[in-house]
Amino acid sequence: MLPELSGHLILDWSAPCLSSFYRALAASFRLLRFDLPGTGLSLTDASPYTVDMHLAYVDDVLDAAGCESTAIVAAGLSGPIAIAYAAQRPERVSRLVLVGTCARYCGPAADGLIDPEMPDILGRLIQTNWRIANQALTSLLLPNADAALASWVTEHRISTMNSDVAVDIVSQQLRADVRGQLAQVQAPTLVVHHRDAQQPNPALARTLAERLPAGVLDLRPGSADNPVLADPAAVVAAVRRFLQPERHLLTRRETAVLSELARGLSNRRIAAELGIAESTVARHIANVFQKLGVDNRVAAVTRGYDIVRESPPQRSSRRASAH
């Protein structure tokens, strides 16, 4: 999970929306998060921020975690950074999820973009009054946020980065333009966006998905500019579906058989429970093994844990038949 502007590995848990999002992701995946140098728990390391530095820092985190390749989830201003990383390090990105973001934020107003002079204006305001500049930044990036969310985002940013660091990070991330790198992104990419979002608008998300070689657009009902903060449960569900495609490879009957395997039932018992022939059960089990890439029952249940957990049991009162 790439940080947007700033974050704090401890304080982030004080926000119900963020903590629920992280906990839900961590329930299904190994979740890696980090604070950018100069922010959060890395506040003392305040080297001048650049996008290249951000990419190198992602390398360092993955190396330290012993992770050769990973799926990356990025929201808002971290989206262009994630795109640049996927384009420049294709061997390290297996899948990419971009939430409420676009390929560039500054450009013609007619395209729904921010005035190119805004980074300089914000930079001067940050140096003069960081709190007021921070409020303006929140209004700019989250125009649809309610008062409570906007207040939390503003206060959280104040507590996780100082004005000197903010000038660099805000300027660099607002100016990031990765349109020229989209064609280099090899990883399958999911673009999640709300239909009535303002910043970025849905047209930018649609263009982003179309220009990515393996891009898929998930345009959801709602007006949140950052769905991670406003609708974390829906985003987690979309991420799970995208990162665990095996869930959708199994048919309904195969899923039912897998659920019975998780109960430790024999083929004969499964056949009786589901009202199908024992030979049909064996065929379904073979298909499950093949689709999940496993060769035994324990591995199948382990690999399909989320499928089993979320699938209601299916029972039949019919006698076993040959179909």
Image: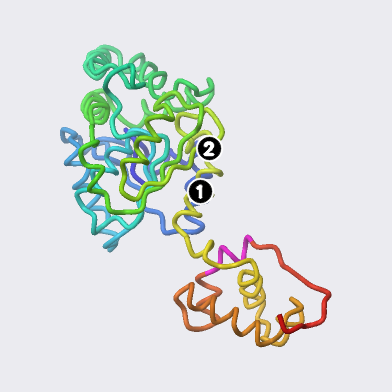
Residue 300 percent across, percent down from the top left: 53, 76
User: For this rendering, which residue is in front, 138 or 163?
Assistant: 138
Is residue 99 on the magenta stretch? no
Q: Image point 61% across, 74% down: which residue?
A: 258
In this image, 320 relative to 289: left or right?
A: right
Q: Image point 50% across, 48% down: which residue?
A: 238
Q: Nearer the viewer, mark 2 or mark 1?
A: 2
Residue 285 percent across, percent down from the top left: 58, 80
* Location of residue 135 with respect to 48 vertically, above or below: above
Q: Image point 82% across, 77% down: which residue?
A: 318
Mark 1 and mark 2 in contact (Cβ < 8 Å)? yes
User: For this rendering, which residue is in front, 232 or 84?
Assistant: 84
Dividing the picture into quarters, in which one does residue 322 lie?
bottom right
Q: State the residue position of label 1.
A: 238
* Location of residue 211 with respect to 243 vertically, above or below: above
Instruction: Indicate the amino acid at tag 1.
Output: Ala
User: Are there few (<14), some (14-19), or many (20+) residues within 10 Å of tag 1?
Assistant: some
Q: Image point 26% across, 49% down: which residue?
A: 185
Residue 146 percent across, percent down from the top left: 54, 22
Is residue 308 on the magenta stretch? yes
* Location of residue 127 with respect to 62 vertically, above or below: above
Q: State the residue position of label 2.
A: 220
Q: Tell me the SS state at disc 1.
A: helix
Residue 197 percent across, percent down from the top left: 47, 27
What are the residue bounds of the magenta stretch? Answer: 304-310
User: For this rendering, which residue is in front, 39 or 270?
Assistant: 270
